[in-house]
Image (spheres, grey):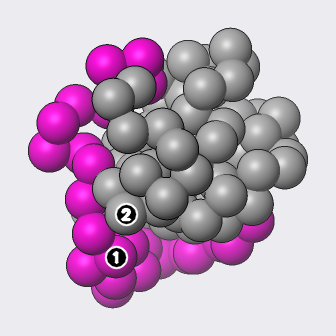
Amino acid sequence: MTESLGILVSTDKHLDHVVNLARAAHEKGKSVDVFFTGSGVRLTMQPQFKELVGKAKLSVCDVSFRANGLHGREDEVPGVGFKDFATQAKNAEMLARSDRYLVF
């Protein structure tokens, strides 16, 4: 069974660290999940965000996305499909299945 890493991003800072960590874990053969919530959803609009595509399973809190004025921009988020805009239950599932869990 592949080891897994869950990353919760609840701040609009440190995208470079999230990308570097996800890349390193992916290169080591780890399964990586990243959930963006709170002000962290703003990072989905940053050009560097696309570097996560293919290295991690990406999910975004739909409520936070809307609360941060991003409703209608869902199609601008690379690597995140309609079903990946989710509730906090998705975060809870990630936490339950992750061998390691980090919070930014």
Snapshot quadrant of residue 42 = top right
Quarter of the figure that contains the N terminus: bottom left
From the viewer's perspective, is residue 49 above or below residue 8? above
Spatial CA span between label 1 and label 2: 9 Å
Q: Which residue is mark 1?
A: 88
- Amino acid type of disc 2? Val
Q: Looking at the image, which is closer to me, 98 or 83?
A: 83
Which of the labelled discs sits on residue 53, or is there none? none
Q: Judge left or right: residue 14 versus residue 71.
A: right
Q: Looking at the image, which is closer to me, 27 or 87?
A: 87
Q: Judge left or right: residue 56 versus residue 86.
A: right
Element type where label 2 sits in the image: helix
Quarter of the figure that contains the C terminus: bottom right
Q: Are marks 1 and 2 in contact (CB under 8 Å)?
A: yes
Q: Report the residue at 24% width, 45% height from top.
A: 84
Whichever of callouts 1 and 2 sits on the residue coming sooner in the sequence is 2
From the viewer's perspective, is residue 41 above or below residue 77? below
Which of the labelled discs sits on residue 63, or is there none? 2
Element type where label 1 sits in the image: helix
Q: Which residues are magenta?
A: 75-104
